[in-house]
Amino acid sequence: MDFRVDWSPEAIEDVDSIATYISRDSKSYATAVVNNLLNIARDLKYSPYRGRVVPEIEDELIRERIVYSYRLIYRIKGETITTAAVVHDKRLLNPFVRRISE
């Protein structure tokens, strides 16, 4: 069974901000990072449980995949996967927990 993958507006903003930041130094690297984020998110529909449980939240339905130095965090609900946040791995997750858990 394939799942449907959606993006929250906040996660889209996260990716836009990441692309803008990286492109200051390298447009090609920014493109590579964004493409990898999109490809991994797209592939979640085949195996959503492949990602690890987010340690700070400890909920089996909130998982993450690591892409370069970013955490692509998503929720599984029924047959839908919602990408909730894309966060640099050096940032604290606390400011994002509410939107991730909604």
Image (cartoon, rainbow, N blue to C red):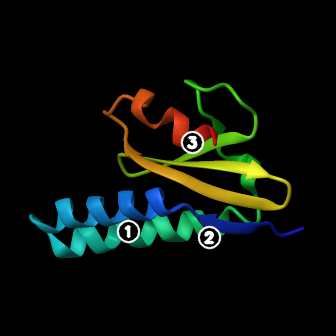
Q: Are marks 2 and 1 in contact (CB under 8 Å)?
A: no
Q: Residue at x 24, y 68 (%)?
A: 29
Say what amino acid the circle numbered 3 marks: Ile
Say what amino acid the circle numbered 2 marks: Arg
- Asked if residue 97 is positioned above or below residue 99 in the image, the reply reads above
Say what amino acid the circle numbered 1 marks: Val
Where the C terminus falls, by quadrant? top right
Picture coordinates of residue 31, whole percent (x, y) = 30, 74
- Asked if residue 40 is positioned above or below residue 74 in the image, the reply reads below
Say whether disc 2 or disc 3 marks the residue closer to the N-terminus.
2
- The image's mark for residue 42 is 2
Mark 2–mark 1 distance (CA, rounded to whole Å): 12 Å
Picture coordinates of residue 1, whole percent (x, y) = 90, 68
Left or right: where 43 falls relative to 12: right
Q: Residue at x 85, y 55 (%)?
A: 78
Say whether disc 2 or disc 1 marks the residue closer to the N-terminus.
1
Q: Residue at x 67, y 25 (%)?
A: 58
- State the residue position of label 1: 34
- The image's mark for residue 100 is 3
Mark 3–mark 1 distance (CA, rounded to whole Å): 20 Å
- Asked if residue 6 is positioned above or below residue 60 in the image, the reply reads below
Image quadrant where residue 4 sits: bottom right
Q: Residue at x 32, y 66 (%)?
A: 16
Q: Element under label 1?
A: helix
